[in-house]
Image (cartoon, rainbow, N blue to C red):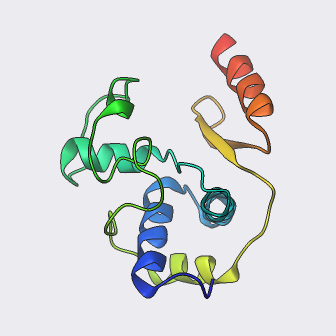
Amino acid sequence: MKQFTFNELMIIGSLLEKEGLDDEDKRQISSVIFNRLEKKMKLQIDATVLFAITNGKYDLNRKLLRTDLKKNHPFNTYIIKGLPPEPISYVGKKTLDILFENNKNDFLFYFFNYSLNKHIFSKSFKEHKERLYEYRKK
């Protein structure tokens, strides 16, 4: 955690606010973010795409499309490497507490499963693709 500035921690907290469903979900996602940053992977967080498309209004009224993920915008973490330039939302105290817990896991990927109403986490791209395939088959 010491390698991150206050502003970077606020940016990560804002990503957790928009991506996480509950406290446990935020713990898992925070570890994914730190794991990806450490490996210099793109974060590929949908909330940043929503922010880029709506200029922070978050009222898209539809699901994200593959073409949305390609929008050239400084907040789109499917395009840029690293963190967006600024937070994408307010960061609550509970989310900051979760962030400073510094939860550790080996996950690098996740997606939202609408039928289960939860995020599904994976350690490898192969596992991620397999779980996505199973989900999309249903």
Could you tell me which quadrant the C terminus lies in?
top right
Residue 138 visible in the displayed image: no
62 over 26 or under it: above or below: above
| Residue nearer the viewer, 29 or 67 | 67
Q: Quadrant of the N terminus?
A: bottom right
**In which quadrant of the rendered view does residue 103 lie?**
bottom right
Residue positioned most to the top: 137
Looking at the image, residue 37 sits to the left or right of residue 35; the answer is left
Observer-nearest of 6 and 41: 41
- Taking 110 as reference, is 65 left or right? left
Vertical relation: 49 (above or below) 129 = below
Return the x and y of residue 37 as percentages of the image width and height: 60, 61
- Please provide percent x and percent y for residue 94: 53, 80
Measuring 34% from the left and 23% from the top, which residue is drawn there?
A: 67
Which residue is at 38% across, 33% downward?
69
Tell me how many marks there are. 0
Residue 36 position in % (x across, y down): 64, 56
Query: Is residue 136 in sight in this rendering?
Result: yes
Horizontal side of 113 relative to 18 (left or right) equals: right
On screen, residue 8 above or below 83: below
Q: Residue at x 37, y 60 (%)?
A: 84
In this rendering, the answer to whether 71 lies above or below 54 is above
Residue shown at the point (48%, 78%) measured from the top left: 9
